[in-house]
Amino acid sequence: MGLFDRLKQGLQKTKDLLRSDIRDLFRDGQILDDEQLRQLEGKLLKTDMGVVASTAVIDQLREEHGGRTVDVEAIFETVKDALKEQLAGAGEEQPDWDNDDPIAPLSLADEGLSVILVAGVNGVGKTTSIAKLAHLLIASGRRLVLVAGDTFRAAAVEQLTMWSERLGCEIVTGAPGSDPASVAYNGCERAIETGADCLVVDTAGRLQTDRNLMQELEKIHRVIASKVPGAPHESLLVLDATTGQNGISQARNFTEIVDCSGIVLAKLDGTARGGIVVPIRQQMDLPVKYVGVGEGVEDLEPFDADWFVEALFEAGE
Ligand SMILES: Nc1nc2c(ncn2[C@@H]2O[C@H](COP(=O)(O)OP(=O)(O)O)[C@@H](O)[C@H]2O)c(=O)[nH]1
Ligand SMILES: [Mg+2]
């Protein structure tokens, strides 16, 4: 299955909501009125795209189609255009990377070791996203070392170890409860020693309100930066698409404490609230680099705004 088809499949729940609901609301040949637009606004809001975006979509529809005879496909086109515009975001531009190169979103070192640090709240999908990234990096011919930086839970180390065995890459772990910064340090040493191309560092889940844990993350950052020039080359914040607006407020505070370079939005397949990517783009000054659309290693897609919107509205299954 190609990347686009996989994305479409992953977005099925949100797609069902949008396409079928718009179809139910509008019938070809009717006159588009305000009541229909109000109802559509409610449906758009159900995808978690937020008030700003849904208002913009409705305004655009009213302007282009209000009082006219409904053409459902033309309505879809207007909704898509309006959404693409909203996904441009308010801050840093969403880069337009090569959709055929799955590692294009990652800024890696031109030569030598690249370090990718992955952080976020508990259970959002960090470790799984690391396995998926590792899979992409290995497929691109890179040699990598994983660091099991979540030393709090034995299960977390086991989980990443299991992935490293499946993927066939090296892993550096520490004793349970040991200082994750020292495990990260050992990981850097190991990667340098073996001439690996990438080091991917997993971390324990933390809330932005937990000062000790946030300081620990800063320390991991510091240690990596001191060992490897330019590191971390990527500092990815993983968000869970199923947590909605709540996840965004958490993430905003997060990025105030540690510098992040991009977002991985996991679990988009598990929710009809895939519209959440819109307020993420609007409220966070960070590009969305990847979206997670399943639990398998292949279920990670580079995020592209146009693709995303097209996948949401593509006709058929
Ligand atoms: N459906 C789905 N499940 C996911 C995705 N990413 C992670 N998960 C699941 O979410 C749960 C928590 O993931 P994990 O990577 O352990 O989260 P962590 O605590 O942030 O490291 C696991 O059961 C994963 O299989 C995704 O993109 N889609
Ligand atoms: Mg984990």
Image: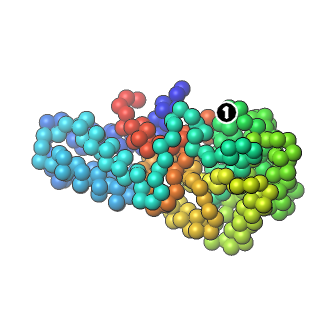
Confirm or reject: label 1 Cβ below 8 Å from ligand 1: no
Residue 279 appears in the picture as rendered: no
In this view, the residue in front, 38 or 68, is: 68
Secondary-structure class at tag 1? loop
Relative to 103, does residue 244 appear above or below in the rendering? below
Q: Residues within 10 Å of mark 1 (few under 14, many from 20)?
A: few
**Residue 305 image position (x, y, % from top left):** 43, 44
Q: Residue at (47%, 50%) from the top-left corner?
A: 94
Residue 264 appears in the picture as rendered: yes
Q: Residue at (41%, 59%) from the top-left corner?
A: 90
Q: Residue at (34%, 55%) from the top-left corner?
A: 53
Q: Amino acid at mark 1?
A: Ser
**Where is the C terminus found, in terms of image quarters?**
top left
**Residue 294 image position (x, y, % from top left):** 58, 40
> In the shown orientation, is residue 53 left or right of residue 257?
left
In this view, the residue in front, 106 or 59, is: 106
In this view, the residue in front, 81 or 206, is: 81
- The structure's colour scheme is rainbow
Residue that mark 1 sits on: 140
Q: Of all residues shown, which one is farthest toward the top?
A: 1
Relative to 118, does residue 213 appear above or below in the rendering? below
For the image, the number of numbered tags is 1
**Where is the N terminus found, in terms of image quarters?**
top right
Q: Of all residues shown, which one is farthest toward the front?
A: 110
**Residue 60 image position (x, y, % from top left):** 24, 51
Q: Residue at (60%, 59%) from the top-left corner?
A: 260
**Residue 181 image position (x, y, % from top left):** 80, 61
